[in-house]
Amino acid sequence: MLDEIKAKLKEKGFRLTPQRQAIISLVINPGPKLTAAEIWGLLRPKHPDMSLDTVYRNLTLLTELGVLIPIAGAGKDGTRYEPVTHSRHHHHIVCLKCGEAACIDTCPINPQFLATVQNQGYQLLRHNLELFGLCARCKPEDRCYV
């Protein structure tokens, strides 16, 4: 995947700086989906001159290049980033307490709804559906949520 990202960056005229490479290496690895602040915190020991703004700019660029998918979270800084490695379209459920995001490997969007959007004159490029709740670790045992 790293080679594909490098090619996309080069094609669009962007350099692969050491900071950008560090961000890419972190977000394309399997594991938890991270926020910009978490990425910054993990990279600061090796890149003390890297600002949080640099992380945000690079995440925005990688999203625009189609390399990352932003997963909306709670609050303005709750967005997590997932590499585009899934071969199938999918959605997410996000824990409002700890921020964990899990993939839902199905799409509940009705094809008729998508056709309606296209009939309105829009060319649909992609869509996201984020569900919000409490994960098994954060959910109180004595409550039932529906």
Image: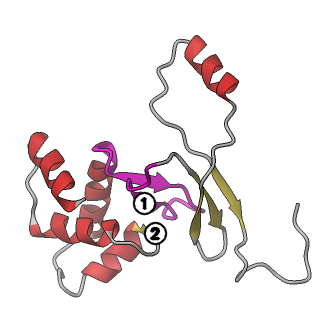
Instruction: Give the magenta range.
Output: 63-87
Q: Are marks 1 and 2 in contact (CB under 8 Å)?
A: yes
Which residue shows up at 10% across the image and 59% down it? 16
Q: Where's the C terminus, which quadrant?
A: bottom right
Q: Position of residue 51 (x, y in %)?
A: 24, 70
Residue 30, image quadrant: bottom left
Residue 77 is covered by the magenta coloring: yes
Q: Position of residue 25 (x, y in %)?
A: 24, 70
Quick check: 30 left or right of 62?
Answer: right
Which residue shows up at 61% across the image and 25% down it? 114
Q: Is residue 21 above or below residue 129?
A: below
Residue 117, image quadrant: top right
What amino acid is labelled 2 in the image? Lys
Q: CA distance from mark 1 to mark 2?
A: 6 Å
Residue 61 is covered by the magenta coloring: no
Q: Position of residue 15 (x, y in %)?
A: 8, 54
Give the residue at mark 2.
33
Mark 2 residue element: loop
Which color scheme is applied? Answer: secondary structure
Q: Residue furthest bottom?
A: 45
What amino acid is labelled 1 in the image? Glu
Quick check: 58 left or right of 38?
Answer: left
Give the residue at mark 1.
82
Mark 1 residue element: strand
